[in-house]
Amino acid sequence: MAIQWLKRLLALLMVAAFTFLGVRVWDSERGAPLHIWHTYVPRELSAKELDAAGWKQYLEAEARIFDDLRQQVSQHLAPDERAPVNRYFVGSPVYPAHFAQDWNRSYTLEPDGVPAGAAVLLHGLTDSPYSLRHIARLYRDHGFVVIAIRLPGHGTVPGALTEIDWETWEAATRLAVREARRRIEPSAPLHLVGFSLGGALALRYALDSIDGKKLSRPDRLVLITPMVGITRWARIAGLAALPALLPPFEKAAWLSVMPEFNPFKYNSFPVNGARQSVRIADALQEQLTRYAREGKLVKLPPILTFQSVVDFTVSTKAIVSALYRRLPSNGSELVLFDVNRSVKFGQLLRSSADIALSRILPAAPQNYRTTIITNSDSGTNEVSERVIEAGTGAATSRSLGLSFPPGVFSLSHVALPFPMNDSLYGLYPDPSEDFGIHLGALAPRGERNVLIVSMDMLLRISFNPFFPYMLGRIEEGITGRSSNATAGEALPR
């Protein structure tokens, strides 16, 4: 009898597997066709090569990659691919090489005089060094030398993410930190700033440096929506690529295939990108659990994290449960951006979003400071800072002089590092720069299936109305002084 039930179970599992694969093949094959920027894979330095290389060697290798990109992709476009909307078309207004600076590439910012410290900036998945340039300028203006590395597989073509692994990103992080430490005095502070994937890499490096005698210890971590945990779909995304093992179904290796009109970020996303997200998040959580058990987390530097309460990409709950609840009392702080509770969306707002904050926050007191940016009252878009001090649970509030823009019901995963006047993602783009498109200023209205991308993509907020506050809080960690940033303050250029 037991054998019969086992056979039935195996049969059901096989039917389910074949059904899943069949649906996956059907779903992928009915999508947009693959182009050369999906199939071409640049030759990046391996993790072993990165560990043996210096900053100069990395920049030389990067220059070769971009030369090959022009020759192997831009010069081989089909006639219908030579369109203004294509970032790989030399005649496109969003062609990155035409700009005064191609922010897809690694860069350094040098202060006047001897550097007071160094900051390593690590961008997010599918992103580029562009995403942290405003924070880079803040550090530069305070006397820090800035090392902003292009993580391998990024800034070129989305096909580059089909064969990359997170160990290579780790090696690139180590290279950037070596260069940062080389440029400053031994006693000067070292800060790591990471956005999304970059946040996971910064935290991972800090943990590795506890036992790694050859790794420089950072003095402070600034994490922006760090990839400590990810969504459930990413955990099964690897199975979605199984049909791609057969050449006729190569599109199954992609979770999304979209036009590439963003000059500094991929729109298309391969399954391998999700798979590497799972791998680094799992490794990070395992290491945090092990180091907490061994009492090693007391050696971590203070961590300042900025996170939206609602986040479609990373798990806000995991940041609290896997990281912050394990931290010692070392001056760390978690800053949460709440949903806008004054918008009149009525029943259109999911109940899960409405109660997200209460489900995330543990009972006070905690070893870390908690700051919540939320509505001053339910009838206005103005926001206040509500602070719950570490250890005591004492709470205070103050008005920030900042507001949710009309119609904005929350921040998003991609919005936090960009001010309202960012030239690409801002609601009010800085006219002194032009990157060929103003993604944050678009307010599309019209019929469905008319645009080349979904309305959902265009409506996702891409700027942070509370960026001056965030910048001011980062500045406190640089100078040691309270900044009290408000909406009227000038952003660093």
Image (cartoon, helix red, strand yellow):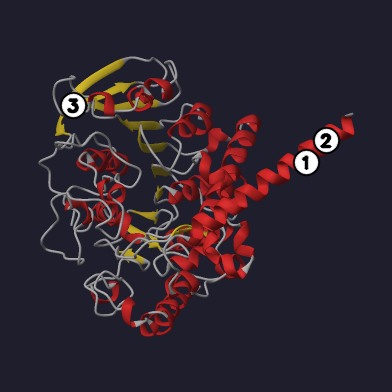
358 or 191, nearer to the observer: 358
Q: Looking at the picture, how far across and down is residue 290, in whole percent?
A: 64, 35
Q: Looking at the picture, how far across and down is residue 212, in whole percent?
A: 61, 50
Q: Mark 3 is on which residue type?
A: Lys
What residue is shown with label 2?
Answer: 6
Q: Are marks 1 and 3 in contact (CB under 8 Å)?
A: no
Q: Give the mark count.
A: 3
Position of the N terminus, as image quadrant, is top right
Task: Tell me the distance, in whole angstroms, between the alpha carbons under discs 3 and 2.
Answer: 54 Å
Residue 35 found in image quarter: bottom left
- Mark 1 or mark 3, earlier in chain: 1
Task: Give the class, few, some or many, for how many residues have Cα within 10 Å of label 3's Cα (few <14, many ≥20).
Answer: few
Q: Mark 2 is on which residue type?
A: Leu
What residue is shown with label 3?
Answer: 344
466 lies above or below 214: above
Q: Looking at the picture, how far across and down is residue 228, in whole percent?
A: 50, 40
Tag 2 secondary structure: helix
Position of the C terminus, as image quadrant, is bottom left
- Mark 3 or mark 2, earlier in chain: 2
Asked if residue 64 lies left or right of residue 214, the reply is left
